[in-house]
Image (cartoon, rainbow, N blue to C red):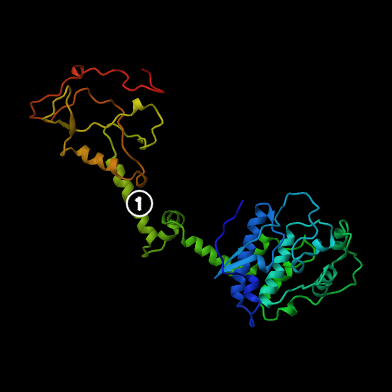
Amino acid sequence: MALICELMDMNIYELIKDRKSYLPEQRVKLYMYQLCKAIYHMHRNGIFHRDVKPENILIKDSVLKLADFGSCKSVYSNQPYTEYISTRWYRAPECLLTDGHYSYKMDMWSVGCVMYEVMSLRPLFPGSNELDQVSKIHGIIGTPSRGTLRKLKKFQSRHMEFNFPHSAGSGISPLMKHASSGCVDLVAQLCTYDPDERLGAKQALRHPYFKDLRDAERRGKQATRSPSIASNVNESRLLAIPGKKTQHQEYSRRRKQQDHHHIAHSQVKGSHHIQPRVGDMRGDASSLILPQIQAKPISGIQSGFSSVLPSHKSTSHRHFLPHVFSDTRTHSKHIPFPSHPPSHHFQPPQGTKQQPLPIHHLPTLPKHTRTGAGYPG
């Protein structure tokens, strides 16, 4: 199987590797918001990436997309997983200290490391090997609590000892003095030692740091809604504003006029019930009777029976044709069908001497005129 994706401009690493000045924080925020949405989409569908790093994050202008799904794993697969997974600098502590007992929360640790690197233009934990990697983590965020250590010791890796010296850590805030407090707080919550206390993708999207992007996204969705849906939702509120006529009100007024006009011209004498819609004829076809219309015979046609066409002066003809040729989606009611069958004889207009032949003079036709599969004969 081959995945064909659109061509992107570059990855995040190529964006920051030669920069001498920081990226605008609003741009970084937009990128990280899209990255969290990509991770959330994967986790919600039961997959975690396991190799989130700047080289696997592609950008094109203001659009970000997550790539390289070669290390993906099902959330519901059985542990232990592969121990040596993810690039070392973005590997979560549970991946380093256990023999493959980690979960989808490892992706969120990697997101925090990437976010710091894009903001600061340098990696957060650049360890040279696994022991140095753990040492770098403890030097910034401190050694884990006893409760976290007990959970990790249950699945302790054969290559890792848990006798690390205690360290309080310098914290992330001194390393991001140029960033806002919301950005620092989000990175700190993503890079939490205990995976059970670490933010998930959905929680990260709800972080106050992304509030302006969530509001802008909500406004964009409301602006792209169709007028009919918007008018149904906001009609009562808009109509309550005196002296202000909006586009939704005008649309609603025209729809009401159309419905009223259609209902007025769809009434049939002696029938006051709701008529069936065109295309909704699920019943017996013999019960569907076309409306009677005033007709006149056509001269010059020699046949065994009289042919008739609607009179141009017929009121029912003028009312009937628009319902036949108009778009059925624009009306709430359509072609009316009377409940009584038509007469066997058409009555020509007064003053016409020619009379149509009675029905018993019509030539008899064979009962079945088609043969083949599904037809008797």
Q: Is residue 365 left or right of residue 210?
A: left
Q: Is residue 300 left or right of residue 223?
A: left
Q: Amino acid at mark 1?
A: Arg
Give the quadrant of residue 327: top left
Which residue is identified by label 1? Answer: 255
Q: Is residue 195 above or below residue 313?
A: below
Q: Position of residue 153 (x, y in %)?
A: 88, 59
- Residue at the farthest front position: 2
Q: Is residue 182 above or below residue 286?
A: below
The residue positioned 58% from the left and 65% from the top of the image is 214
- Residue at the farthest right position: 163
The residue positioned 66% from the left and 58% from the top of the image is 69
Q: Is residue 84 left or right of residue 219?
A: right
Q: Is residue 176 left or right of residue 4?
A: right
The residue positioned 57% from the left and 59% from the top of the image is 5
The residue positioned 63% from the left and 61% from the top of the image is 67
On-image quarter of the C terminus: top left
316 or 127, nearer to the observer: 127
Give the quadrant of residue 263: top left
Q: Is residue 101 above or below residue 7?
A: above
For label 1, the SS is helix
Q: Position of residue 51 (x, y in %)?
A: 71, 62
Does residue 337 appear in the picture of this structure?
yes
Q: Position of residue 358 (x, y in %)?
A: 18, 19
Does residue 206 appear in the picture of this structure?
no
Q: Position of residue 63 (x, y in %)?
A: 56, 67
